[in-house]
């Protein structure tokens, strides 16, 4: 497959002046009361946008997502300062069930399915806040979105392929009728063709259901191809942000995240691993 992707135009709802759905202001996150994982991170997601949060492994991307979803406690993490607003409400001290009821649902890294339950049973877990009529309606929507899951509705999740498990994880999140979908590394460990299918589905969800999407990814090329705006994190900080088009043209992003250089056309992995960052990168 070609490694180049065509950026999509934002839908009508992404015009300047649209409402802010999710806003993070200068949050600091510490693990175990001592280890600073995120420092002074701010970002904004507007209604109907796909916003990507990019960076290498350990940059702090998933920690930000866990803070938004209120699941830091499980890893002894805590928001030391700053604020998180969802639809104008401060949620940095809210519990996870409240955030789900407010309309934000996370698809976690690694899928986190119930391996001994069937596909359909895993989906039903995501609809625990819905009545039976809504449950059945949303399940049917998921099966239309992912016909493969309809065929395997009675198959135990642990026997599915990685791509099929990712479909179940996304479908489970959709069962609660979210307004904001937060995806943590949806391409992780998947074959290129399956990654293309998953990213196409993300675009479909934005265009057909009006979902606002926060996408955490290491695969910058894939993410920038579908996102309207992106933030790049390193060492717990946002070091660069801008429209996807602008970032795709940025020389630093092209060299260090897309593996391209003006001189050579493509940078070797050895060069990427041993580069000396330009001073302006962290300015």
Image (spheres, grey):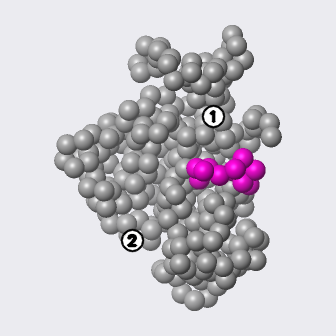
> Does the magenta run of residues contain 135?
no
Which residue sits furthest top? 263
Q: Is residue 152 left or right of residue 75?
A: right
Q: Is residue 162 left or right of residue 113?
A: right
Above or below, 138 against 252 in this view is below
x, y percent for residue 95:
33, 66
Above or below, 108 against 156 in this view is above
x, y percent for residue 149:
71, 73
Q: Is residue 111 left or right of residue 200?
A: left
Instruction: Tell me, for residue 132, which label it has, or none.
Output: none
Residue at coordinates 38% horizontally, 32% vertically from top-left? 235
In the structure shown, which secondary structural element does the residue marked by tag 2 occupy? helix
Instruction: Tell me, for residue 97, which label it has, or none.
Output: 2
> Does the magenta run of residues contain 195?
yes
**Quadrant hosting residue 175:** bottom right
Residue at coordinates 55% horizontally, 44% vertically from top-left? 217
Residue range highlighted in magenta: 186-197
Q: Earlier in the sequence, mark 1 or mark 2?
A: 2
The residue identified by callout 1 is: 244
Q: Is residue 238 visible?
A: no
Rate crowding at label 1 as few (under 14), some (14 to 19) or many (20 or more) other CA atoms within 10 Å: many
Q: Looking at the image, which is closer to me, 259 or 101?
A: 259
x, y percent for residue 165:
62, 65
Q: Is residue 99 visible?
A: yes
Which residue sits furthest right? 1
């Amino acid at each position: 497959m070609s490694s180049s992707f065509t950026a999509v135009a934002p839908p009508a709802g992404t015009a300047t002046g649209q409402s802010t759905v999710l806003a993070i202001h200068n949050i600091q996150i510490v693990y175990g009361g001592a280890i600073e994982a995120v420092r002074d991170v701010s970002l904004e997601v507007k209604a109907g946008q796909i916003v990507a949060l990019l960076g290498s492994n350990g940059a702090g991307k998933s920690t930000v997502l866990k803070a938004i979803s209120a699941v830091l406690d499980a890893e002894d993490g805590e928001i030391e300062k700053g604020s998180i607003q969802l639809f104008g409400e401060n949620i940095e001290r809210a519990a996870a069930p409240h955030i789900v009821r407010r309309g934000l649902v996370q698809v976690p890294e690694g899928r986190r399915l119930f391996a001994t339950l069937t596909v359909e049973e895993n989906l039903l877990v995501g609809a625990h806040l819905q009545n039976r009529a809504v449950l059945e309606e949303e399940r049917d929507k998921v099966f239309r979105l992912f016909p493969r899951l309809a065929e395997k509705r009675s198959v135990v999740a642990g026997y599915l392929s990685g791509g099929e498990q990712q479909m179940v994880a996304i479908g489970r999140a959709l069962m609660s009728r979210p307004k904001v979908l937060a995806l943590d590394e949806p391409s992780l460990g998947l074959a290129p063709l399956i990654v293309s299918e998953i990213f196409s589905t993300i675009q479909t969800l934005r265009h057909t259901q009006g979902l606002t999407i926060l996408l955490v990814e290491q695969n910058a090329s894939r993410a920038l191809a579908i996102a309207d705006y992106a933030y790049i994190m390193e060492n717990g900080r946002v070091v660069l942000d801008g429209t996807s088009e602008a970032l795709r043209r940025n020389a630093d992003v092209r060299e260090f995240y897309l593996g391209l250089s003006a001189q050579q056309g493509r940078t070797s992995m050895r060069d990427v691993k041993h580069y000396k960052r330009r001073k302006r990168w962290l300015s």
